[in-house]
Image (cartoon, rainbow, N blue to C red):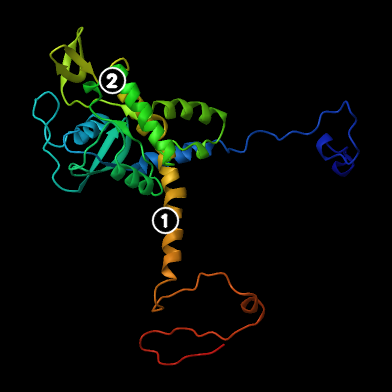
Amino acid sequence: MDPLRRSPSPCLSSRPSSPSTPPCEMLGPVGIEAVLDQLKIKAMKMGFEFNIMVVGQSGLGKSTMVNTLFKVWKSNPPGLGVPPPQTLQLHSVTHVIEEKGVKLKLTVTDTPGFGDQINNDNCLRPLDIEFLQRLCQTVNVVPVIARADSLTIEEREAFRRRIQQNLRTHCINVYPQMCFDEDINDRILNSKLRDRIPFAVVGADQEHLVNGRCVLGRKTNWGIIEVENMAHCEFPLLRDLLIRSHLQDLKDITHNVHYENYRVIRLNESHLLPRGPGWVNLAPASPGQLTTPRPFKVCRGAHDDSDDEF
């Protein structure tokens, strides 16, 4: 049979298809799903970075809380009974943590006692309010109630409600911010977290034997406070928020929102400075500048004395 006289295939037919004729479909996948594998391979090679700063009064256990969160023992491993050294000055420490082939470069900035000389009467101090109002515009803020084991359940809940009221009254937006909820699932999950903020946490660097199993906790005269037991404290909620469920979201908001806002502020402030080498006009052009061409100069190298006009 003459190949030129063969009837065209159904997919190349120029005749309109009847209602009973199924439309042509794409023959097989093109491999888009492989993008996820590429991202995973790249992430496994490069690892992740995460920066965290802890702020609070002296003796609240800031260093112990970070050690408990990331299992980073700066001086002594758990079980030796030696408390970590007290932080006396602002400093940052970087650790590389690897778990099941995933690497995390963790940078922790520890602070000396914040507001040690200011009295705190079961509410946010004026220094806390001003500090948080400034800080929440620059970074993601996650408040916690430290040493929650020193409060009864009733005292803890009453203190939490007072802090929440202070945050609302002074327009302090802590993480997770309501305006960044992307869909109904995010809204449901984040609403539950927002209702528990500030988290009542207990830090510990020692393991104890409870009912035949080793648990991380603090031993008291009336028993052992288990760090990862929700009936004792809310440390699991804080850990899940920072690591297991919202770590990438924390990084994205920091990069795409907080850093960009800071960048815009700095660029706007640059126009208040005297003009000098490298000065660039980023202000909107006037109508005359958009319609009337003006000559401009090309800067030459340091050894070129000529100025060419165009």
Question: Residue 234, image x and y in percent?
Answer: 32, 23
**Hey, what amino acid is under mark 2?**
Glu
Label 2: which secondary element: loop
- Estimate how packed mark 1 is, as few (under 14), some (14 to 19) or many (20 or more) residues with alpha carbons within 10 Å: few
Q: CA distance from mark 2 to mark 1?
A: 37 Å
Q: Is residue 248 left or right of residue 69?
A: right
Q: Nearer the viewer, residue 216 or 110?
A: 110
Q: Residue 262 shows which numbered tag?
A: 1
Q: Examine the rendered structure and indicate whether residue 242 appears above or below residue 273.
A: above
**Residue 166: numbered disc:** none
The correct choice, above or below, for 128 with respect to 222 in the image is: below
Nearer the observer, 300 or 166:
166
**Position of 292 compared to 230: left or right?**
right
Measuring from the top left, give residue 2's x and y in whole percent. Answer: 88, 41
Q: Residue at x 20, y 20 (%)?
A: 217
Q: Identify the residue position indicated by label 2 in the image.
A: 228
Find residue 276 and report its horizontal and vertical position in percent: 39, 79
In the rendered structure, which amino acid carries the disc numbered 1?
A: Tyr
Tag 2–tag 1 contact (CB < 8 Å):
no
User: What residue is shown at x 41% (from left), y 30% (from top)?
Assistant: 245
Q: Which of the two discs, 2 and 1, sits closer to the camera? A: 1
- Image-quadrant location for residue 3: top right
User: What residue appears at the point 54 percent right and 28 percent down from the top-left corner?
Assistant: 185
Judged left or right of residue 227, residue 171 is: right
Q: Give the residue drawn at x 11%, y 37%.
A: 85
